[in-house]
Image: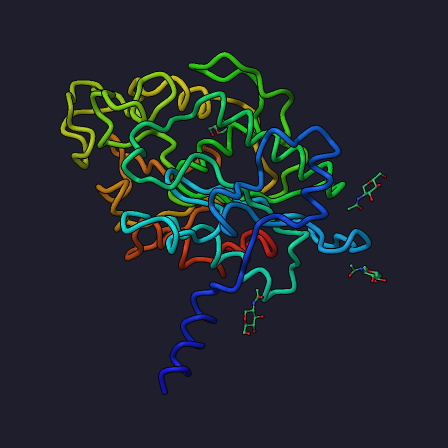
Amino acid sequence: MWYIWFFIVVIVSGQNVTGPITQDFQDWLNRNGYAQDDFVRADLGNAGSYGGRKNSSDKIAKEPVIFIHGNSDSALNSKSTGGVMSIATGWTNSINYFLSKEYQSRELYATSWGNTNAMEASQRTHDCATLTRLRRFLEAVLAYTNATKIDIIAHSMGVTLGRKLVQGGLVTGGNCDLGKSLESYVDTFVGLAGANYGLCNCMGGSQQTCNKQNGFWPGDSCGQNLYTCSINPPLYPCSNPTYSAYLTSLNNNPIKIASYVYSAWSQDDDLIMFKDLVWGRPTSLIPNSTAQKVYSKLTHMQTKENTAADQYNMVVQHTI
Ligand SMILES: *[C@@H]1O[C@H](CO)[C@@H](O)[C@H](O)[C@H]1NC(C)=O
Ligand SMILES: *[C@@H]1O[C@H](CO)[C@@H](O)[C@H](O)[C@H]1NC(C)=O
Ligand SMILES: *[C@@H]1O[C@H](CO)[C@@H](O)[C@H](O)[C@H]1NC(C)=O
Ligand SMILES: *[C@@H]1O[C@H](CO)[C@@H](O)[C@H](O)[C@H]1NC(C)=O
């Protein structure tokens, strides 16, 4: 009996999806000036990255999908090598699902950013080094695939990084310019459990990831409300709180990042907490979204891991 369960577990958890990016893509990256970007991330074994042609004569038939993970996560599931504290389940479930729907590795791309040490999560922010490298990954995938349209699926901090990667331009709180907007290349942008208006747990803004410039600072007051970000409804009238400069510029940017923008989140998110509300508004709702989906019972990581079919429908059918 045990071996039947073993196989069921392997299939359901999709551990057979293995990276890193293919030799063909690696060779292309090395030939085209991307050798220093380390998109392979061999430090995470086979989980550091994914995507590319297996054979240089393979045709790319579908719009490539680029996956951008959140803080302390990795491209694919790296929990087995990441130690007991690791939460890094990566995009393994989503990629497995897309593969089961006749996508190929040459149409699905991910790289890792940061490391998977959750103890260091409080130090990571929307900085120029991370944004510049991930923007180069988008540009590399566009050039390698010759795609005229791509889709982006992002989770958690990947949402607030990914929106900026598409918007381009100067980075608030940093000293870099990401270049022109890539909006015309993006068909669908899916934002799962992002913190677009910051995190109530970041009031005060003292940790680096919560900082007021390019972190998740939600503002310390709103109208007469002082340090009560998580109280809903707010005690006093509240509109337009001052929050992180980076997030403010992201939300005020007139660039529409994709033809279809979907936001999804869970009422039970254990990281964002407070039913996803920040000063009374859902922080995971990307401004001007085409549509939104609200789950009731998923954790922060499950909002990525357990929703592959919804992600697929958003990207392929434009339904939610
Ligand atoms: C690549 O595909 C071509 C055409 O289908 C085939 O002839 C060749 O053997 C393949 N190469 C490899 C390494 O699989
Ligand atoms: C994973 O393994 C199962 C069982 O062998 C197979 O049916 C499935 O196609 C594999 N998935 C991928 C993405 O290789
Ligand atoms: C992309 O275009 C270049 C230049 O025309 C070509 O060499 C390359 O094979 C194309 N790549 C794909 C994946 O079609
Ligand atoms: C987003 O919606 C607001 C309010 O409806 C509108 O003023 C703004 O122009 C929209 N922005 C974009 C980029 O469509």
Q: Is residue 97 above or below residue 122?
A: below
Residue 290 showing in the rendered view: no
Foreground pick, 56 / 242: 56
Percent x, y of residue 308 = 48, 58
Residue drawn at (20%, 29%) of the image = 229
Figure label count: 0
Q: Is residue 91 left or right of residue 83?
A: right
x and y, in percent, of residue 141 in the image: 67, 39
Where residue 218 sits: x, y (%)? 28, 25
| Residue name at image x 41 percent, y 82 percent | 3
Say whether residue 309 is left or right of residue 184: left
Decide which of 82, 62 is in the foreground and name it: 82
Q: Is residue 229 visible?
A: yes
- In which quadrant is the N terminus drawn? bottom left
Asked if residue 24 is positioned above or below residue 138 in the image, the reply reads below
Whether residue 180 is situated above or below residue 54 in the rendered picture: above
Residue positioned 47% across, 71% down in the render: 11
Q: Splitting the image into four quadrants, where does ligand 2 fall?
A: bottom right
| Color theme of the render | rainbow
